[in-house]
Structure formats: C-alpha cells, structure tokens
Image (spheres, rainbow, N blue to C red):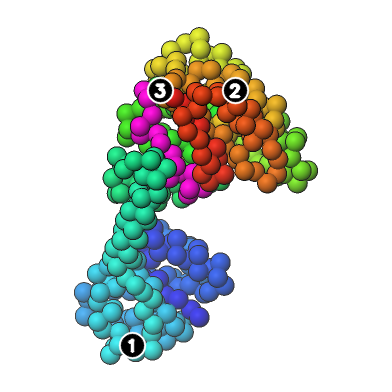
C-alpha cells in the first residue's frame, strides 16, 4: 500500500504520515505550495495544482500512476468533498480514506457528548445528588485529560466530578502530581465549582519516588525516568490548562507543609503568587505509597482538612502494596463519627468528613 497525503502542508498531514510510517506504509506527500514545510516527513513528495485548477485531475492521475498510489488521505474538508464526488469516475481505482475531516470532527463531538452524559450520570451517583456540572463540561474534561499521562482512572475522575463541586470553601491540595493528570482534574473541577486554590506538591525526584514496600520490579519502574522531564511535563500540562488560583511546590511533602502553614501565599516562576486559605477542602494523597510515607503525608496535612471536606487516598486498592489501605483504614477508624460517608472509586478511597 502506498498512501498519498494531500495537501501535505497541514499539521494533520504530517501527523498522519508519522503514524502510517509506523504501520509500515509508504507515504507520498503532495501540496499546491511551492515550498511545503512538511515535505521531509514523507517518503516522496510532489507538487500538485490547486484543486480548482483545470489540470488538477490530470496531474493527480499522473502522480498516482508514477508512484503506484493505492490510497489517498486528506485532512482538508473541501478537498475531501471534491474527491468524494469525482474519484469514482475520474480515478475509480484510487481509494479515498474516510470519513472526511469534518465528519470525523462531528463524530468526535457526538462521541464526547455521549461520554459526557454518561459521565454526568455516574458523577451524580457518586455525589448522591444531581451534579451541578454540565454534560459538556464533563465531556471536555474527559477529552482533555486523555492527553496527560497518568493512572487516574475514569471512575476516579468521575468521583472527583461528583464530590468536589459541593466541597466547602478551602484549598485543594494534592501530594504527588507526576505529569499532572489528576492535578488537572482537581483544578478544573474545583475552579468551576468555586472551591478554592489548587496546590500541587511533588519533589519530582528519583530517590524520593522509590516505593520500598513494593515488589522489586515496581521499585525499579521509575529508575530510568528523567524526573526533570516529568516535571517539565507537569508544567506543559498545567500551564496550558490550569484555571483559577493554581500553583505548585517542588519539594518534599514535609517541607511544603512547613511553607503552607507559615505563609498564605505560594509563589513559583511559572504561576506567580497564589493566595491560599490555609485550610483544606479537598486533600488528595498520591505521593510515595510506602506505608510510612503515606502515614507522614496524612499526619502532616490531614489535620488541616475542614469539616465537610474530603480526603482522597489514592490506590487504596493497589496490587503492589497495602500502604495506602492501612493508612486510610486507620484514618477512618480514628475519625469515627466524624466520617459522614466513604466509598471506593477507581481504586481510591474517598472520605467525607461531617460538616
């Protein structure tokens, strides 16, 4: 199979060429521009007339014959419309790869809205009441979050959508951010609901990431990571989509706690100075999963959670260790009657304190 991509100057064309190359396909690019910035992305490149030119189809036929092209992909809606109408009679042996770009986008929107409506129903179940979030909001959130690497599951995301909008006023504090997947969800939902500032704490440090209670293969999993790149990935994620008051501290949980209780602002070069309440509405514990580390994080930050607030213990159901489960169980027992409700979603334990 040899695929022609036309017009090849579009970003979507270069992206398709890279993907098709991974499939082992030969890809020929063509453009009506004299200089195509994407020409080097293709196995071969040619110039074609603009689609409105009288010699367009003659030139296209010659190119198809010369390069033995079997399929044609276009990311350009007017081009797709023209070829869809003309190819069956002009070049019946050339297969137009569809659906077209406009139809693909409409399908994406339709599918996203369906996921948003289904997600809204599930978020309402977790909330125990109809969710205040629009289905379109959840649709956009679910689409955006898939661009960020992480293990924050769909069920956990929808549980956050269910409980965070009705949390009391206060800060949203996350211990352990990695690339920012759950950071984005907490910030976006919390900001939309007017809960308060979001603060992410992570040292982005190899030595502090090793979970010594876990099996050896889990301990070694992050040894090859460049943690400065992971940190940069967090900035890429959050600088592009953080809303409202948002900031981070690149330091240990203990050091960050000291700054948090001492000051009422957090400052970083990227996000400037962010005021904080000094009281926590939602605490998400997702740092090192060793029992001692989780216990320390909860001992530091747990007492700052306000009545009616939420504590989320990530990986309560974790196949590689039971540190989060042990700490969460002890916390629930210690809270006693202060626990209004608790449930597990996406492997995380959600604990709601009484107002």
Residue located beneath label 1 in the image: 91
Label drawn at residue 355: 3
Q: Position of residue 353 (x, y in %)?
A: 47, 26
From the image, state whether disc 1 or disc 2 is nearer to you. 2
Who's the residue at 53% across and 42% down the image? 344
Assign a secondary structure to mark 3. Answer: loop
User: Between marks 3 and 1, how big is the CA–CA gap?
Assistant: 71 Å
Q: Is residue 244 above or below residue 240?
A: above
From the image, state whether disc 3 or disc 1 is nearer to you. 3
Q: Main secondary structure of the magenta part?
A: helix
Residue located beneath label 2 in the image: 334
Who's the residue at 48% across and 72% down the image? 27
Q: Residues within 10 Å of mark 1 (few under 14, many from 20)?
A: some
Which residue range is magenta in the image? 153-169
Q: Is residue 263 found inside the magenta-colored segment of the image?
A: no
Front residue of 62/317: it is 317
User: Between marks 1 and 2, how big is the CA–CA gap?
Assistant: 75 Å
| Image position of 96 (left or right of 23) | left
- Residue 36, visible in the rendered structure: no
Q: Residue 280 occupies which quadrant of the picture?
A: top left
Q: Position of residue 16 (x, y in %)?
A: 45, 65
Sequence-wise first label, 3 or 1: 1
Label drawn at residue 171: none
């Amino acid at each position: 199979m040899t695929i022609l991509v036309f017009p090849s100057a579009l970003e979507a064309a270069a992206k398709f060429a890279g993907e098709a190359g991974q499939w082992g396909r030969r890809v020929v690019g063509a453009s009506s521009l004299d200089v195509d910035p994407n020409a080097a992305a293709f196995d071969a490149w040619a110039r074609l007339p603009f689609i409105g030119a009288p010699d367009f189809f003659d030139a296209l036929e010659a190119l198809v014959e010369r390069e033995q092209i079997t399929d044609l992909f276009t990311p350009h809606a007017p081009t797709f419309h023209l070829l869809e109408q003309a190819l069956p009679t002009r070049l019946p042996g050339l297969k137009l790869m569809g659906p077209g770009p406009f139809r693909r986008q409409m399908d994406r929107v339709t599918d996203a809205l369906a996921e948003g409506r289904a997600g809204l129903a599930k978020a309402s179940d977790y909330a125990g009441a109809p969710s205040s979030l629009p289905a379109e909001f959840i649709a956009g959130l679910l689409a955006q979050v898939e661009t960020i690497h992480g293990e924050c599951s769909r069920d956990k995301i929808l549980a956050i959508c269910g409980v965070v909008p009705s949390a009391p006023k206060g800060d949203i504090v996350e211990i352990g951010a990695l690339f920012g997947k759950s950071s984005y969800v907490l910030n976006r939902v919390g900001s939309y609901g007017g809960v308060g500032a979001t603060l992410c704490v992570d040292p982005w440090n190899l030595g502090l990431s090793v979970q010594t209670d876990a099996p050896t293969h889990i301990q070694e999993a992050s040894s090859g990571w460049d943690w400065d790149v992971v940190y940069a990935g967090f900035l890429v994620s959050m600088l592009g989509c953080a809303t409202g008051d948002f900031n981070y501290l690149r330091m240990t949980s203990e050091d960050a706690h000291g700054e948090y209780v001492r000051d009422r602002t957090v400052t970083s070069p990227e996000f400037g100075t962010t005021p904080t309440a000094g009281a926590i509405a939602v605490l998400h514990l997702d740092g090192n999963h060793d029992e001692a580390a989780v216990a320390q994080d909860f001992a530091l930050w747990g007492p700052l959670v306000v009545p009616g607030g939420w504590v989320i213990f990530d990986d309560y159901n974790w196949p590689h260790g039971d540190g989060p489960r042990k700490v969460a169980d002890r916390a629930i027992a210690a809270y006693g009657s202060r626990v209004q409700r608790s449930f597990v979603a996406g492997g995380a334990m959600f604990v709601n304190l009484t107002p």
